[in-house]
Image: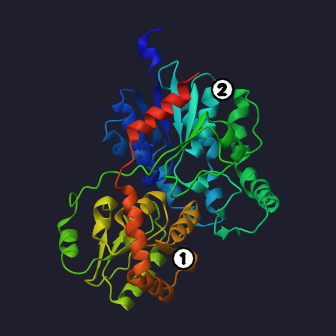
């Protein structure tokens, strides 16, 4: 066998918003730095972002397809979000499978996959196209567990609840909510290919990968006894801070014109957050605080803003947050990690997905508070912000946690460990 054929070719397959794409780009770039060939597969909408990093890219669908999904308000509803994302799951699996098969044949093609892409990677492996699969978990709640802390959507399971009840609760959730939506979609993609049916989405996601990798540190979430093995514990894949680079003149002037602002964002993909920003405006005016509103959609920000509040479509959080007093956000794992690194208090206002669990862990670390987005009110928000901005205990905890970032994670070492684990016989 030719030497080039023994060096793995990695196919990175992921879905989601910019916050989901960045961590996988970090892995892809590290693999390329190790001299590995890498092909990145995701929504065509992200082509410019990925290709700007010099990474080979295969796009799925159209920009309109992606924007149509974001336009669905159910995507940010705590109970309806899963059904919204699964509505076209079969088509997504088939598109991923076709994209993987379009890559020139390679005996050591290894899939680095987002959990939602694992079924497509498993099909490619069963058809002899992919040799191995590494599952990448960006947040703790992406991995099924019955152990504490256990947050299931907006519900936090009490620590005293017996294991038998926790297992029964998970069975109820899987059989009554998850599998009726997801399993039929997966099997509709598998059956025409003559592949065996799967009977559980979460069971399939846990069993199919050859190795699982967590992209968060143990101090944020230690491995639970029932997490899949082999398991590699990684770290937050944060980008390097860029100082003032990329700041608009308007933003630079605002930051230099008064006290540190409170930063508000519902996440880059949320275009249904008008209530979030309206509530934020009333709260900061009540407190007499300066604020920055981050969203690409200007229409969801109040039309008239006082001089003490600035709207910006996008700013790199690594550069902005060290200049902020606190942050109010949705609880996406990337945003959460950037606020931890900046050492500022956080108010997490979860809408859906892993955001509830991430917020719970922020509260558990003593660096912030949680207030569900559906329960956000100006008075409650103002009181919470006042506590975050004045609590010496919270500020000390923020500083201690920020010190954990003094030694940045080594993406090259992590990629070497993934390759060593997945290629050893």
Q: Secondary structure at mark 2?
A: helix
Place of residue 332 in the rendered image (x, y in percent of width and height, measured from the top left): 48, 61
The residue positioned 71% from the left and 56% from the top of the image is: 146
Q: Secondary structure at mark 1?
A: loop
145, above or below 127, in the image: below
- Viewer-side residue, 98 vs 132: 132
* Mark 2 neighbour density, 10 Å: few (under 14) some (14–19) many (20 or more): few
The residue positioned 35% from the left and 51% from the top of the image is: 407
Which residue, as the protein is rendered here, is positioned at the far top? 1
Q: Quadrant of the C terminus?
A: top right
Place of residue 41 in the rendered image (x, y in percent of width and height, measured from the top left): 47, 37
412, above or below 162, in the image: above
416, above or below 314, in the image: above
Res 51 quadrant in image: top left
Of callouts 2 and 1, which one flags the residue occurring earlier in the amino acid sequence?
2
Residue, disc 2: 126
Tell me the distance, in whole angstroms, between the alpha carbons under discs 2 and 1: 44 Å
* Mark 1 neighbour density, 10 Å: few (under 14) some (14–19) many (20 or more): many
Q: Would you say 409 lies left or right of 170 here?
A: left
Q: Would you say 252 lies left or right of 91 here?
A: left
In this rendering, which labeled residue sits more in front, label 2 or label 1? Answer: 1
Residue 144 numbered mark, or none: none
Res 141 quadrant in image: bottom right
Residue, disc 1: 371
- Viewer-side residue, 121 vs 371: 371
Place of residue 378 in the rendered image (x, y in percent of width and height, measured from the top left): 47, 86
Residue 259 visible in the shown view: yes
- Viewer-side residue, 255 vs 129: 255
The residue positioned 44% from the left and 54% from the top of the image is: 19
The residue positioned 65% from the left and 57% from the top of the image is: 83
Place of residue 337 in the rendered image (x, y in percent of width and height, measured from the top left): 43, 59
- Viewer-side residue, 98 vs 7: 7
């Amino acid at each position: 066998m030719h030497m080039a054929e023994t060096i793995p070719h990695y196919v990175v397959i992921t879905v989601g918003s910019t916050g989901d794409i960045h961590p996988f780009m970090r892995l892809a770039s590290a693999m390329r730095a190790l001299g590995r060939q890498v092909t990145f597969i995701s929504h065509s909408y992200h082509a410019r972002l990925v290709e700007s990093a010099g990474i080979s890219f295969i796009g799925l669908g159209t920009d309109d397809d992606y924007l149509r999904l974001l336009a669905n308000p159910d995507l940010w509803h705590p109970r309806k979000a899963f059904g919204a994302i699964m509505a076209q799951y079969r088509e997504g699996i088939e598109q991923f499978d076709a994209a993987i098969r379009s890559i020139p044949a390679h005996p050591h093609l290894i899939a680095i996959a987002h959990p939602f892409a694992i079924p497509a990677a498993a099909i490619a492996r069963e058809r002899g196209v992919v040799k191995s699969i590494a599952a990448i978990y960006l947040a703790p709640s992406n991995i099924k567990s019955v152990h504490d802390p256990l947050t299931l959507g907006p519900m936090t399971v009490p620590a005293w609840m017996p294991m038998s009840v926790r297992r029964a609760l998970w069975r109820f959730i899987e059989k009554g909510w998850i599998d009726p939506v997801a399993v039929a979609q997966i099997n509709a993609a598998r059956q025409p290919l003559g592949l065996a049916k799967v009977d559980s989405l979460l069971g399939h996601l846990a069993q199919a990968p050859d190795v699982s990798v967590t992209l968060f540190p143990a101090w944020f979430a230690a491995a639970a006894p029932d997490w899949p093995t082999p398991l590699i514990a990684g770290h937050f894949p944060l980008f390097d801070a860029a100082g003032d680079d990329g700041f608009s003149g308007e933003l630079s002037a605002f930051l230099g014109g008064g006290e540190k602002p409170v930063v508000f964002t519902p996440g880059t993909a949320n275009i249904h957050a008008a209530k979030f920003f309206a509530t934020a405006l009333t709260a900061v005016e009540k407190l007499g605080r300066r604020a920055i509103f981050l969203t690409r959609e200007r229409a969801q920000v109040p039309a008239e803003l006082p001089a003490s509040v600035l709207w910006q479509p996008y700013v790199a959080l690594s550069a902005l947050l060290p200049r902020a007093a606190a942050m109010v956000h949705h609880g996406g794992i990337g945003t959460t990690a950037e606020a931890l690194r900046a050492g500022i208090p956080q108010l997490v206002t979860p809408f859906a997905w892993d955001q509830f669990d991430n917020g719970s862990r922020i509260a558990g670390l003593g660096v912030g508070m949680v207030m569900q987005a559906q329960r956000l009110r100006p008075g409650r928000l103002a009181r919470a912000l006042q506590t975050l901005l004045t609590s010496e205990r919270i500020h000390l905890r923020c500083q201690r946690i920020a010190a954990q970032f003094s030694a940045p994670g080594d993406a090259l070492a992590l990629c070497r460990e993934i390759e060593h684990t997945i290629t050893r016989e």
